[in-house]
Amino acid sequence: MSRTTFCFVRCGNVASGSPAAAADTTPCLFTSVTHCRPPRSHISTWYSLYFNTKMPRHKGRIISAKRLHTLQAKAAALKRAREARQAEETEEELEQAEWEIPETPKAAVRRKLSPGSVEENAAPKKAKSTETEDNTNCAGGRRIVEYKVLGKGLWCCYCKECMSLDNIEDEKLFGLGSILNVRCHKCCTINVVPTGKRHADSLNRETLFDVNAKFALGVINSGSLYAPLRALFAAMNMPIMSYQTYKKYERSVGKKVEEVAKVSCEEAAKEERELTIQNKAALEQILPEHLSADFIIPTTVTTFEKVVRIMVSFDMGWSRRAAGRNYDSLNGYGCMVGNFTGKVIDYDTDNRMCMMCEAGHTPDTHDCRLNYFGSAKGMEAHVAKKLVIDSNILKSQNLEVGVLVTDEDCSSVAACRAAASHEIVKQSDKNHASKGVKKVLYGMEKKHGEINAEAIKWLHTCFTYALSQNKGNSAAMAIALRAIPLHTFNDHTLCGNWCGYKRDPENYDHRTVPGGFTNEQLREDLIDVFNKLADNANKFSAAASSNSNESINSMMARKCPKNTCLSMSESADFRYAAVVGKKNLGEVYTQKTMELTTLSPGIPFNTSYVKSTDRATTSRRSLYNTRDFKKKRIIKAKHRANIKYRKEVAEGTTYESNCNLLVLDGVEVIPLGEDDISENWLVGGEAEGVVVLFDLETGGLKADSDILQIGARCGKKIFDTFIRPTKSIPKETTKVNGLTSNSGDLFRHGKQVKAIPLQAAITSFIDFLVSFGKVVYLCAHNAFAFDGPRILAAITRSGQLQRFQSTVKGLVDSLPILKKNRPGKSNALGIVAQDLNISLKDAHDAVADITMLHLILQELKLSASFLISESILVTTLINRMELKRHLENVLTKGMLDKFAKGGLTVESIQDTFNASGVTGVTTLVKSVTKHQASIDKLCDWCQKQNAGHSTTASVTNNTVLPFTASTSTATEPVNEFLHVAWTSNEPEERQSSPDLFKEYLPPDFETSQQLPFGDF
């Protein structure tokens, strides 16, 4: 081997004497021979001559043999994998082709057919699916591209020929952007083609795709998360950036969002300062009277400009749902909202944990947001102090917080006052205050049955009206608050012009609570609550609201879902900054963020979205403040609640905690129902009469409660009517029978029913009984203790007792009858029906209950003759009722029963005592009983009544009697059903003087006591 060849092989240089000897001479790397340094093209030529082959190149560069072998091995491996994948896809295409319909070839047109076209009469071929997602090339699936950028890049940089995307040889994904290596079909040059615009990174290199930054901004703005978006992109067969790449872009864009939010807060602070100065007089009018004239703008001299004290509202939110003691959120966020601008003045967040720090990284290696080490409950006071006292934005604008509007849930004001050098006035949020009042009133509902849901809503409305109508006048507000409980008890001494009694004293009555409240204990409790509210009227004088803060918390809950933890990194802070930017600037904050990131603003689609969204927000805000919308919203909510209640009652228990825990599974049996009623089961013989089942639904268990429904049934004949209420219906009653009242109208399960006055209902009921043409025996479940006294009282009040007695002979109580047939078991109507497999549909409806009772009597084979034998005469019942009212505390129940069955009445005892004294009464009573102790008690009672009422006159047959059972002054409460005109065997004078019936009342009779007949 010659020296020239040797030098060429070892160092790549050519010895002297070669054709390139004229070039620069350089000593050999391995010998002292001096030779020239030829051009690289000559080296390649001589290499090919010597080795009989070309020098290996890769991407235009000469490479070593070792590098060549490595690349060849990789290429062989890729080829084998590609061939295997192609074989699998070929099998799948063959399987799919069997189900595909071949396309009919179109006729060839005059112009030259394009490649791949078929002739007009060519045989049809099987078509391949054009929607196949998987592609063997590197550019399979879908991409997000920018038309202009991609179109500009598809011109060959060497020959200026337009390239095709079919010639993509390689693709590098950079998140949602791509760089394509496209080979020119003319010159075979590989061109680098980006799919979108790029912007500079931290080293000022144009390497970051705009679409990735906008994707991160869109995720923050929409409140989405990476995981669901990854699933969305996978379903669309689109590549998505890795989570690490997403976090990189999120941190880059999120900091710009924070900058936009802070700038907007500074602008809002400037605007709030100007508006506060302009509206200084108006602001002073709604503040407490004790504040000095220079409170808003102090007269102290400063080096900058005058300090202005603004009015702001503050509220806190947490990134985790909690209630009661379960407050353990890792993140909290709060902001101050200006009173006049409604914009965020400043905001701050508290974070209790950092994921990077937990993993062992030091804070200087990442953007650590850990800044709080207390409990979640203490965050609100901590953030309030930082914003009110240490806010850099307030200091830069020479502002101070003078009035702070907050709720009553925490000690924020105390923390701010402790750190402030000036007075901070506390104003309660009227919405939180009204909710607190409503909560207290609902607590009273458990203690006092007289107050119900409708009454609570009425009191709550009165409270809110008192705040709104006396805004800025705490003294007038205190008087209005003290007048509310008195107004409900018909004491109108403190009422203002808002009271209807002041305008029409004779005809005024409460619409929600007819007649007003009467419970004295309830009166004391209501007065105590509203007096405390009146004592704190200074807190409500501004009638301020923190609705803006609540709106911000709601926006944050949408952008940062509470079911996902984002508070262990910067994500939660970025999203709260986005909320602040949207609150202050609107949706345009996204475009301002893009400008700071050197991105395009997004014309035309993003700009159009921003304009339409801001326009919709403005119109929606103006609509929500209109009176008509608020009224319609209340009506709609009430209607929806009525439907919900009606459906739940009709469906029964469908969902409840552990409702099926202790229930045994078994075979379902179809219960007895309406079709199983026997028409003639309750009809007796000609001499016996007919048994009519009846039931009452009332407005409560008290004796003076309204009768709201009367239902009666005998076989297939049914009577059903609703009665117009005159009093409010307690909530406990509504839960049982579903009846409610509103402005005199009656509703059943939220649906209004046709109701008539009591007089008309009683007339229709008696007409129904007369229609049978026989003697009637009324039967009810628990008739002697509940239904019987009330129906007789209503009939007496309507003046139709004589007509009733001419048709109805006796009363039957099914409860003691069932006790005899079912000893040792519960005999409540619903339980008996359930034991006998009888349908319980629409229980506590009068007609439904008597239908159940009819089926029970029919199932137990209790005939009409048997029920009639168990009846008690109506005259005996009325007599028993009168005796019990007067002699309940004198004689035993058994003795009163003997008196009633023996025909003794209070009136006969009175007449006998007035005529014959004690001797006559003793002789009269011995016809019934010889129990001397009872006779002596009755004689003593007669003497006491005579001595206590010797001056009271009673008109009977135009004679003044020296003795009556009892008297009552005009001021004593008397049950209204006792003010009746008796028409059965009564003198004319007694019929025309309903007040004389007071003599039948015991001295200690109360309107709330029960009216049972007693036990028979």
Image (cartoon, rainbow, N blue to C red):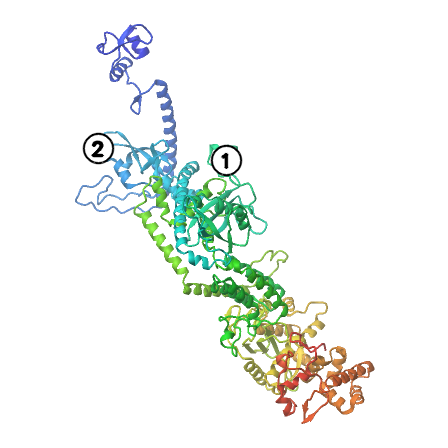
N-terminal of the pair, mark 2 or mark 1, is 2
Location of residue 592 (image quadrant):
top left
Q: Is residue 219 visible?
A: no
Quarter of the picture holding the N terminus: top left
Query: Foreground: 734 or 170?
Result: 734
Other residues around mark 1 within 10 Å, as few (<14) / some (14–19) / many (≥20): some
Q: Nearer the viewer, residue 891 or 543?
A: 543
Residue annotated with mark 2: 160
Can you tell which mark lies on residue 356? Answer: 1
Residue 479, percent across and down?
54, 66
Examine the image and state in which quarter residue 41 appears: top left
Element at badge 1?
Answer: helix
Rendered position, 381 above or below 495 = above
Q: What residue lies at 58% left-to-right and 49% top-to-bottom?
A: 326
Q: Amino acid at mark 2?
A: Lys
Q: Is residue 414 left or right of residue 167?
A: right
Q: Measuring 52% from the left and 48% from the top, which residue is drawn there?
A: 416
